Image (cartoon, helix red, strand yellow):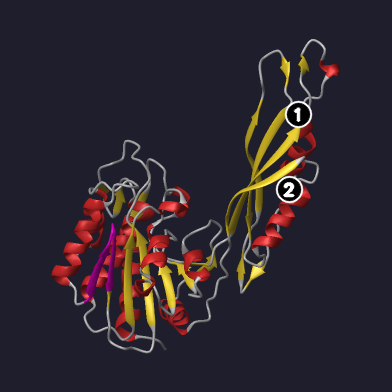
Amino acid sequence: MIDLLDLAAELVDVPSESHDEGTIADLFERRLKESSQLAVHRVGNSVVAKSELGREHRIVIAGHLDTVPANSNAQARIEGDRLYGLGACDMKGGLAAQLAAALEVDDPAVDVSFVFYPCEEVAAEHNGLKHLFEVRPDLVQGDVALLGEPTSAAIEAGCQGTVRVKALYRGQRAHTARPWKGQNAIHRLAPVLERLSNYDGLRPNVDGCEYREAMQAVYVDAGVAGNVVPDEAILTVNYRYAPDKDSTQAEQHVAELLEDCDELIVDDHAPASRPALQHPLLQTLISRNQLAVKAKLGWTDVARFSAHGIPASNFGSGDPSIAHTRDEYVERNEIERVYSALLDLLKNGVI
């Protein structure tokens, strides 16, 4: 049997910062072609390995190959049953579990598509999963999908939406020695910043999962010179919202809170995804492995599957709260638990 912690360490030692995934994609393609019973497809730096057995159900098991930039942590380091290194948590531990399952299964009870893709950690226009949906949707279709984002080997269902807006507040320039001649646009932000500081996000329960909404000011762009009353201030606000709202409702809610601005521009919007835990493949995975289930508070690529009518959840090793940190790590037992649960579902099928 493959030592999963060693495999994860091997993957950490392959540099794969966003836009530089060619080497690790080559590794996945080579291993899958040499040792798996699956048909392997390469699209750019995406690698897809599929069974074609005509089973009743197909599950998509997906993971991104890229990491954020290194932060003095490029090399793997194993201490006992813990692996440190760039991407150990997000998400090379999860990739190790997925790759090992792909190499092990030879006659799955359900059809499976393993999808390994680049550029998840950068702007959406570069996202490898988005690209596959556009150019080879046949490779990413399924009845249900599991994304290997770090969840500490629990199911984190669906995901919250995220909308980022820019609110423009206008004023009038004047000399700071005679400010009454103008209007300070920065000072106009005081009431809205107080509202944001006191914002108490809703905690809706959606399909048994409690989400937690939040709204934060993240940028202020203002100021002309050290002796000039500013005539313009742009406040950027990020709203994380639960999947009981659609995109229009989320934008309306932000607009209501920022109603005193002169102009509101939606800068970026990634819709939420409902938990959708009722599919028998997900029910089986959860019940047979006694997995904890909770809401995914961040946004992940499960929303891409959801947008195409494919129920999806997050299931991977690693603590999401330490992802992207210099000292991120992953525990052996979490990788092994994810691997065992995936392999059980593939070999034994639904309840």
Which residue was labeled with disc 2? 199
Q: Would you say residue 23 is visible in this rendering?
A: yes
Compared with 275, 217 (above or below) is above
Q: Residues within 10 Å of mark 1 (few under 14, many from 20)?
A: many
In-image side of 112 versus 283 (left or right): left
Residue 73, image x, y percentages? 31, 40
Q: Is 222 in front, or is 203? A: 222
Please, what is the three-letter code of the amino acid marked with disc 2?
Tyr
Q: Is residue 3 left or right of residue 287?
A: left
The residues tagged by marks 2 and 1 sit, at their Cα atoms, a distance apart of: 22 Å
The disc at residue 137 is: none
Element carrying mark 2: loop
Observer able to see residue 200: no
Which residue is located at x 53 percent, y 81 percent? 278
What segment carries the magenta color? 38-49
Magenta stretch, overall SS: strand
Q: Residue furthest left?
A: 34
The residue lying toward the viewer, choosing from 182 and 301, is 182
Residue 58 vertical placement versus 130 (above, below)? below
Q: For residue 170: magenta?
A: no
Q: Residue at x 37, y 58 (%)?
A: 128
Which residue bears the numbered disc 1? 185
